[in-house]
Image: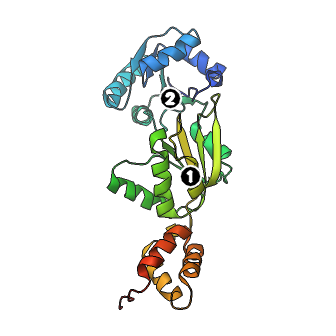
Amino acid sequence: MLYLVATPIGNLGDLSPRAVETLEAADVIYCEDTRHTGILLQHFGIKKPTRSLHTHNERERTEEVIAALKEGKTVAYVSDAGMPGVSDPGAMLVDACAKQGLPCTVIPGASAVLMSAVLSGLPAQPFTFVGFLPREAKPRREALDAIAPIRHQVILYESPHRVQATLKDLLDRFGDGPAAVLRELTKKFETVVRGTLSELIERFSEEPKGECVIAFVPGRKAENPAPDLDELLFELLKTESLKDAAAIAAERSGLSKKETYRRALELKGSRRPEG
């Protein structure tokens, strides 16, 4: 049997008795980082051989695991923290077992995704988890475009030094909707900051410490992307002051007043394009 075992995301007390029993019974424990897992095993007095299985050797090690299972061995797999297969290796193992007709199961436990869905304060049913956004510009835009039709809570992971930049990207793409930044979940300095995206951008002007999760609900801007803004502002500027036109445009488009005012200022005095 292959066991995918969820491990603590910060608080070692979250490792269940069933998880401890499973790790103690395993013939070998495959892990994302043997050093990281070694600390966990030492804490619980578990002495078992470990082997690495991470993103860069996942295919090779999966073949090893399948071979061990066919020999009748009990194999456990743990990622560094949380549930294997969720933004961590693990899915390939399950797929390989399914194709080979070999038994596998999950030992449930801590999950940053589920904890954030509830603790964010946003409606948790339904929610969409997207993991880490790509860092490269084009794949990142494509990922944000894929989120655009969603009208419920979206959860993503982000490194501390990129939190503010990602919040700005979300504001620019989706408008100023409700959001939360959750950091150091289950740890001593666990923090949840709730507000709008613009408020969170100000709050995280300085880089936070620890692992971070961002939860948000895409705003109305996803329905009415930026190209419609110029058309709206041209109409409003016919009868409204610059300030009022920007305020009305912000309300109708879901954009920030600062953004609509800046664009209204650029358009004021220019000619509306024909057609």
Is 260 positioned to the left or the right of 119 in the image? left
Task: Using the numbered discs, state the Cα–Cα distance from disc 2 to disc 1 in whole angstroms.
Answer: 46 Å
Type of residue at label 2? Cys
Nearest the camera: 195 or 128?
195
Q: How is the image coloured?
A: rainbow
Mark 1: which amino acid? Glu
Q: Report the front residue among 11 and 203.
A: 203
Q: Which residue is mark 1?
A: 202
Q: Which residue is mark 2?
A: 104
| Front residue of 120 and 153 | 120
At x 56%, y 78%, the residue is: 243
- At a point 51% along the width and 74% down the height, the residue shown is 261
Residue plotted at (64% across, 23% down): 16
Q: Is residue 224 above or below residue 239?
A: above
Secondary structure category for the residue under label 1:
helix
**Which of these two is toward me, 27 or 52?**
52
The answer to the question of whether label 2 and label 1 lie on touching residues, with beta carbons closer than 8 A, is: no
Point 44% across, 11% down: residue: 49
Residue 241 position, x and y percent, is 56, 85
If the image is split into quadrants, where does the C terminus sit?
bottom left
